[in-house]
Image: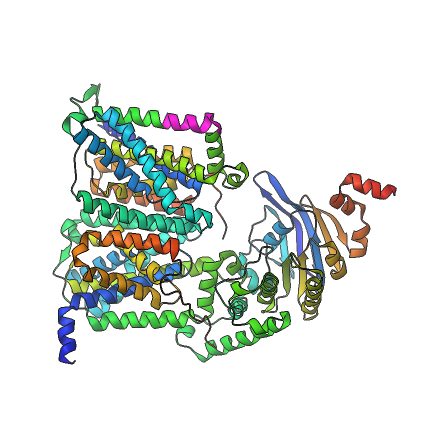
Amino acid sequence: MPIWLDDFLWTYQNVVYALGVNGLLGLSMYVVLSVGQLSLGQAAFMGLGAYSSALLTLKLHLPFAIVLPASTIAPVLFALAIGTPTLRLSGVYLAIATIGLGEVLRAAYLNIDYVGGALGISGIPERAGVVSIYSLLILALLGFWLIGRSAIGRAMEAIREDEVAAATMGVNVARYRLGALLTSAVLAGLAGALSAHVSSFIGPNEYGFEPAVTILSYALLGGIGSPFAPVIGAWILTLLPEMLRGFADLRLVFNGVIIVLAVLYLPNGILPWTMRRRAA
Amino acid sequence: MTLLRTEALSMHFAGLVAVDAVDLAVEAGSIHALIGPNGAGKTTMFNLISGLMLPTSGRISLDGADITALPAHAHAGMGMARSFQNIRVFASMTVLENVLTGLHSAITAGIAATLLRLPMFRRQEQDAVTRARAALNLVGLAARADDRAAALAYGDQRRLEIARAIAGHPRLLLLDEPAAGMNPAEGAALSDLIRRIRDAGTTVLLVEHDMGFVMRLADRVTVLNFGRRIADGPPANIRRDPSVITAYLGAKVAAKLNAA
Amino acid sequence: MLAQQLTNGVLLGSTYALFALGFTLMFGVLRVVNLTYGFYFSAGAFVALFLTRNVGWPIWAALPAAAVAVGAIAVVLDWLLLARLRRINAPELSSLMVTLGAVLALYAGMTAWLGPDIRRLPAEVLGGEAMIFGPLRITNAQILVLIATGVMVTALLALMRLTPIGLALRAMAENPDAAGLMGINTGRLAALVSFICGTLAGAGGVLIGLNFNAIQPYMGEAMMLRGFVVIIIGGLGDIRGALIAGVLLGVIEVLTAGYVSSGLKEAVAFAILVVVLWTRPSGLFGRTQIRRA
């Protein structure tokens, strides 16, 4: 590694990690929005991944190669419990149930001593890094790119546009929606495990309402025309507060306002270009 | 041979009987029209047949197989396709992508085959593009393949919907008011298109308001009024059927016509 | 002991019912899940805190004033955020997202302005000794909660059952297709419903502030979870369902806190929500039609 890159990484290590993790979170929002649903469970899924992976590392001393994939189990189970009944109903139900999930898990972490209560979990060894975070981000981007340019991608777009017409074309709408939610839970769980294993500490308040809405703002700012858009959105919203440190208090106000403006005036985000939906 | 059959099919909405014990038999290889005044239950019939609604009672079968409770998405795999009265193309997709979506159930490559770009995936995608282009050719939209569906004029969007529905060569095609909003020349071209679709082996069931259009095109006509079947037969008989005239024109006018 | 717990539960639950009533009415009539609703709750508590602490008003005057002020805020927010979406007939999730972004900005702005600390109402507001009725011990604050909730629910039900506009609102809440047939000016209607709902949420905030004597910008966020539980158990848009489910939730929470663990009351409430979604998605008392996709 050249010295300047080494220096750069050392100085901005946390920002570099955050860009990768938040990119994954942006994608986990993207996949749900792509099938016309709104889930606010991303932060909760991330928290489940972070807590379960930290416990596996600290209490069971498992190697990270096992911890990382295992961190997706808890988010997937919660996504199944909430997604299965709600995805058959109108989109409002999934949104409501997933907002609730974040609140409940926060209260649970606070009150369960085994997971550290209000103190959270500290002393998590640094097992993840630039390589693990960015290779997962690149794999996820590549996966969504390949899926987007196929019958599966067309079906997802069709569901988002008109679920009745999509069903008439033979698309099993409920199955696609559940698949998207589970994929989203996997990505958020991985992001949680990665961030826990680069930051050494996790706490109950890191996965509540505010991060949930912030993750939504990534995808709404970038748009969902292609998988790159939400990642760029995440990067902008991660870098901006770094540059505007004086306004730390107003960072969340800013994220909220971005959502309002994006929905009202920029429904396709700042990167509205859509990818081709076929391979040949 | 009867391709589609409904037996005593009924649909009740909170106190309202939209479809009332309707028997319908659509012969394979025919163009069958379902007509009736506004609110007669035609679109509800279509929604029941295509699985968008679950009937209150009665039975629907396709080629002898019971499809009454089949979910909407499973109908495509059974060889059924439909268009909608209010156009429902996927506006953000290109014309070609719209038609490719109509071939969804013909593409069996799963996630793994898609991610790995296996030969099977490539073959199926290419095959689908070929079939989609053929469908676009048939409806005369081949030149617009790469345009956004939203950019098409109203009549072209209707033809796109038909192309999307026929791309997979369905056994049964349901068309909900295909001629709505078309001028006579466009209507004639549409009749021609529907005949060609029938000749290519697809049975057509259509709902239509334009009586002249139906009488010139259909092999058989079923008339609904207030959710009940009031007549069924070849167009020539339907035209003379007193109950149909009454339903359409009202009892007074019908009596006057009879007297005249 | 149990009788005391049940009394506390019913009193707490009646506040939940009051809060959820506005939320469900808003969904029923305007077909919008308006998440700024949680902010109205916090705003009500803070206005009452300001009026009692800084201006020195008694609570019986501060409560209605706060409720009306929040009603006005609700009208303005509805106009800023949702009027445009209604005009372009945007999908229902758009309005959910826009109010979600707005509520985050509002909470965060409030925290930046007023600080994140828990504040308390002046001691004299809460009033002296608790009253003893046989085995029951009831505080003055609880009596105020009971009276205020009773008055507001009765007033709302009277409005809904006796006035022409109320009947129209009820018809629309129960049957969304009727909205178009009524020929009511939707702009004015949205303002009216927002005002009523803002008043209910604002009053709810004051009453919960009294009940627990803890006021904090994000208090509406925690309350929204209860709002969700109540309107899903009661059935989205179902007014009677919201009343019953609200009281039920209060009782369940108090009993869970009393006999199991106070840390688990949110989890219990949410578990009920998930069970209801699995078994009776249209609500326990549901008539609401569930769309078949």
Q: Is residue C267 above or below residue A248?
A: above
Q: Is residue A256 above or below residue A136?
A: above
Q: Is residue C112 above or below residue A125?
A: above
Coloration mode: rainbow
Could you tell whether A143 is left or right of B101 in the image? Answer: left
Residue B45 among those drawn in magenta: no
Q: Where are the magenta residues, as a range?
A: C153-164
Give residue B229's position: percent from left, percent from top.
Answer: 71, 47
State whether residue A62 appears in this view.
Answer: yes
Could you tell whether B11 is left or right of C245 in the image? Answer: right
Residue closest to the eye, A279 or B188? B188
Residue closest to the eye, A102 or C21? C21
Q: Give the residue drawn at x 19%, y 47%.
A: C112
Give residue C47's position: percent from left, percent from top.
Answer: 24, 34
- Say how many tags the image has: 0
Give residue C19's position: percent from left, percent from top.
Answer: 33, 35
Could you tell whether B27 is left or right of B83 in the image? Answer: right
Main structural element of the magenta stretch: helix, strand or loop? helix
State whether residue C261 appears in this view.
Answer: no
Residue closest to the eye, A2 or C185? C185
Q: Residue extending furthest right? A: B260
Give residue B84's position: percent from left, percent from top.
Answer: 59, 57
The quadrant of the image that shows the N terminus of chain C is: top left
Residue C264's image quarter?
A: top left
